[in-house]
Image (cartoon, helix red, strand yellow):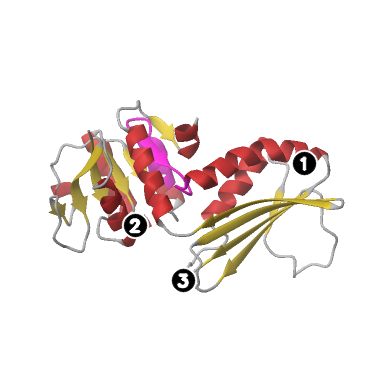
Amino acid sequence: MVKIIMNGCNGHMGKTVCNLVSKEKGCEIVAGIDIVESKATFPMYTNINDCDMPADVIIDFSTASVVPDILNYAVSKKIPIVICTTGLSEETLKMAEDASKVIPVFRSANMSVGINLIASLLKKAVKTLDDANFDIEIVEKHHNQKIDAPSGTALLLADAMNNSMKNKYQYVYDRSSVRQKRDKKELGIHAVRGGTIVGEHSVIFAGKDEVIEFKHSAMSKEIFAVGAIKAAKFIAGKPCGKYDMQDVME
């Protein structure tokens, strides 16, 4: 039985994870951490440093500002951690890097199994389609409350292709400031914000007289919770190091 500490247990994603774990075989929530107190079937703490429950893994769905404290706690207790929180500062990313030398640290820009499968497929597709002179454009769509642009997932997909091609592409986010033809080394990334769109990502390969498109649509945020639980089960008991969804899918 994988024992999980859920950080951010009263947030939307935290509640979703807790609900899914309650129906999942092989794992359980042994403690929840959140600044907002509530009744739960497991012990609740407003400060993670007060938590003394034995655990196999921590899942973090919180805010970027509290991730350093969670990392320090995980290192001090030698507990593997799944970081689902996005928008981390360079300083926090460095902390996660340092922590991975002591404990297993799992982090992905998107916890969806589907998105990470597409990222894996793109690594192969780009090599063939680049040789055939296809242009690449990414269009991402999200709800009107999303602050950052482009999305971390759009960059995850772009980086998967660029790394596969030895970083030959230059990311272009706006063409309105210049009047010139598209360069072959451009990789366009475009953000759309509106309504309640959970998340939609399209990678378009446009060639001569043909277009190939990879598309992923998130219908609910539950898919990210499902991925987080898979990650927690995967990372429990692993040696120290850095892990992501590509490791889960291998």
What's the CA distance linking mark 3 and mark 2?
16 Å
Is the residue under label 1 in contact with that under label 2 (CB below 8 Å)? no
Between 21 and 241, the one nearer to me in the picture: 21
Residue 129 disc label? 1
Q: Residue at x 71, y 50 (%)?
A: 170
Q: Which residues are magenta?
A: 93-112
The residue pinned by badge 2 equals 13
What's the CA distance linking mark 3 and mark 1?
35 Å
| Magenta region includes residue 110 | yes
Q: Residue at x 26, y 51 (%)?
A: 18
Relative to 7, is 226 on the left or the right?
right
- Image coordinates of residue 14 in percent, x first then y, are 30, 55
Element assignment for label 1: helix
Q: Amino acid at mark 3?
A: Gln
First in residue order: circle 2 vs circle 1: 2
First in residue order: circle 3 vs circle 2: 2
Q: Residue at x 70, y 39 (%)?
A: 125
Between 87 and 205, the one nearer to me in the picture: 205
The residue pinned by badge 3 equals 145
- Image coordinates of residue 128 in percent, x first then y, are 76, 36
Element assignment for label 2: helix
Q: Residue at x 54, y 57 (%)?
A: 217
Residue 183 in view (yes/no) = yes
Disc nearest the viewer among 3 and 2? 2
Q: Quadrant of residue 93?
A: top left
Relative to 48, is 220 on the left or the right?
right
Element assignment for label 3: loop
Circle 2: is it few (<14), some (14-19), or many (20+) Cα within 10 Å? many
- Image coordinates of residue 208 in percent, x first then y, are 87, 50
Q: Amino acid at mark 2?
A: Met
- Image coordinates of residue 159 in percent, x first then y, are 61, 44
Q: Where 145 sits versus 226, above or below? A: below
